[in-house]
Image (tube, grey):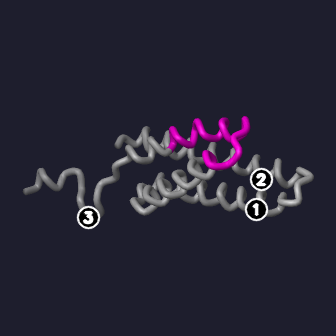
Amino acid sequence: MRTSSVMLTVRLFYIVAIFWALFAGYWLLSESAYRLAYSGMAVVNAGLLSLLGYHLAQRKQWARWGAILVLGFNIITTLTDQMGWFDWLYLVPAVGLLIMVILLRFPERGVSATSDLTK
């Protein structure tokens, strides 16, 4: 996949990570008894998405598979929870991002783009 597609995917990863960081702040300031647990999970999710986005920019195949797992888990848990406006707001970019990550193709390690030309 072209570099511009990879970088667009990485930027969207960072946008979704910022979304989770804002969600963490929202829960931390709420009056809920679960605020520390929810905000803590959101911070971990934001950090994980940022880390995966960084390694996707480095074209790491393990980051691609990790991103598919994390995004899939996030989407499933969002759909099985009570759906509010915040969930719908998150679901749209998350599904788009999952599709983009699935479509990413990185070259296998040890295989260069010109390897067929040198045979």
Q: Earlier in the sequence, mark 1 or mark 2?
A: 2
- The residue positioned 52% from the left and 52% from the top of the image is 72
Report helix, strand or loop for mark 2.
Answer: helix
Q: CA distance from mark 2 to mark 3?
A: 41 Å
The residue that label 2 is drawn on is: 24
Rendering quarter of residue 70: bottom right
Which range is magenta?
A: 78-97
Q: Nearer the viewer, residue 102 or 112?
A: 102
Q: CA distance from mark 1 to mark 3?
A: 40 Å
Residue 46 image position (x, y, % from top left): 66, 55
Q: Residues within 10 Å of mark 2 (few under 14, many from 20)?
A: many
Q: Nearer the viewer, residue 73 or 12?
A: 73
Q: CA distance from mark 1 to mark 2?
A: 7 Å
Q: Earlier in the sequence, mark 1 or mark 3?
A: 1
* CB atoms of marks 1 and 2 within 8 Å: yes
The residue that label 1 is drawn on is: 40
Any magenta on residue 91?
yes
Q: Residues within 10 Å of mark 3 (few under 14, many from 20)?
A: few
What amino acid is found at the position of numbered circle 3 in the picture?
A: Gly
Rendering quarter of residue 83: top right
Q: Nearer the viewer, residue 97 or 106?
A: 97
Marks 2, 3: nearer the viewer: 2
80 left or right of 118 in image: right
Q: Is residue 85 above or below residue 51?
A: above
| Quadrant in which the C terminus is drawn | bottom left
The residue that label 3 is drawn on is: 110
